[in-house]
Amino acid sequence: MTKHVKMLAVATVVVLAVPALAGPVTLKDAYKSDFVIGAAMDAAQISGADAKAQAIVKAEFSSISPANALKWEKVHPAPDRYDFRLGDQYVEFGQANHLFTVGHVLLWHNQTPDWVFRDGSGNLLTRDALLARLKDHIDTVVGRYKGKIKAWDVVNEVVGDDGKMRETLWSKIIGEDYIAKAFEYAHAADPEAELLYNDYNIEYPGKRAGALALVKKLKAEGVPITTVGIQAHYLINEPDLKLLDETIAAFGALGVKVALTELDIDVLPRPGDQVTADIKLHLAADPKFNPYVNGLPEAVQRQLTERYSEIFKIALKHKDVVDRITLWGVTDGDSWHNNWPIKGRTAYSLLFDRAGNAKPAVAAVISAARP
Ligand code: XIL
């Protein structure tokens, strides 16, 4: 190399290095060496009808979850009928864009048709018949996306709000080993997939104790659980984030990974400020529970920004345990909080506003990664 060429090479390196010094500009790049950052996609986003949100997913996120597309009622609506149209589009989108693609959910007590638990005459199935039906469902759905869906929520919300195992038709008909069976079937259908137990409010000590006992027992029995999903459907001041910090540490100590699987922050008041993600909760509309129809006040925006930033800082502190943070939606307009627990509200739960612009929380979350 001549001296001139050498100088040119050095100059090029310096110029190329400048943008890096300015810091990362997307969420996924900011957290690249820590964990993947996901967003849940609804049907319009999966199909491309909502092109604006799809573009945000491609630009900012490294993982996707299906808000509803792979729930039992969607993917397996009748005993002998599977419907993979939306599921296939979802997985193709993930493949085409190199996204860590998540499956949600194999076994739940909600969004599961009643026929699942009954025979042709409407009587409850026997244990063996329900296990056979569960195995067929898991073999078919997990098998179809083997190697493409990298993590499955195997069981959802199996611990009750009282910290005891939740009683559902699954537990009643099969008995307490229904959870172990679901994990075994999922592992057999795709031995490489990460397998989760997913739940809400397991930050609170009472319910957390139940969830910890469950995971401890499953691990001791050799059940192939890899990860605990903390849903993280939060309010603006509940739960105290100290509880999140403790919870991640407590599950990490059991030898499982932790993912925040459905993160969003409801800034709107609720009657009694109930902290829950029970989708069956429906409360009456009242203007006092929908205070920000004309926009979010600055002070609340700041609180939201601060809270998002704190959550990501806590996850970073535990980056050896945390492998993913997924937001439950892309823009405020498509958050489920617009219609739950009260219909027709104007929610501000996510990181992008209704127009698709990054809210101040995005910059705060990015700088939390590289202070
Ligand atoms: C929600 C979806 O976002 C809504 O579109 C649907 O109407 C109800 O379910 N916990 C879960 C998710 O595990 O599947 C739920 O998703 C939110 C609570």
Image (cartoon, rainbow, N blue to C red):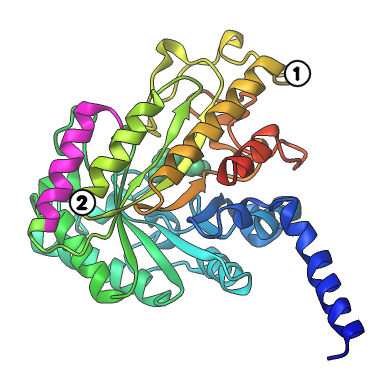
Q: Main secondary structure of the magenta part?
A: helix
Residue 119 image label: none
Compared to residue 356, the image places residue 65 above or below, namely below
Is residue 153 shown left or right of residue 350?
left
Residue at which label 1 appears:
294
| Coordinates of residue 285 in the picture (x, y in percent) | 54, 16
**What range of the chain is rendered magenta?**
203-219
Q: In which quadrant is the N terminus drawn? A: bottom right
Identify the element where label 2 is drawn: loop
Is 252 or 79 nearer to us in this picture?
252
User: Within the image, what quadrant is residue 185 found in?
Assistant: bottom left
Q: Which badge, 1 or 2, is on the more N-terminal residue?
A: 2
| Coordinates of residue 186 in the picture (x, y in percent) | 27, 68
Tell me the crowding category of disc 2: few under 14, some 14 to 19, or many 20 or more residues within 10 angstroms, Cα based: few
Residue at image position (58%, 68%) is: 89
Tell me the crowding category of disc 1: few under 14, some 14 to 19, or many 20 or more residues within 10 angstroms, Cα based: few
Residue at which label 2 appears:
122
Q: Amino acid at mark 1?
A: Asn
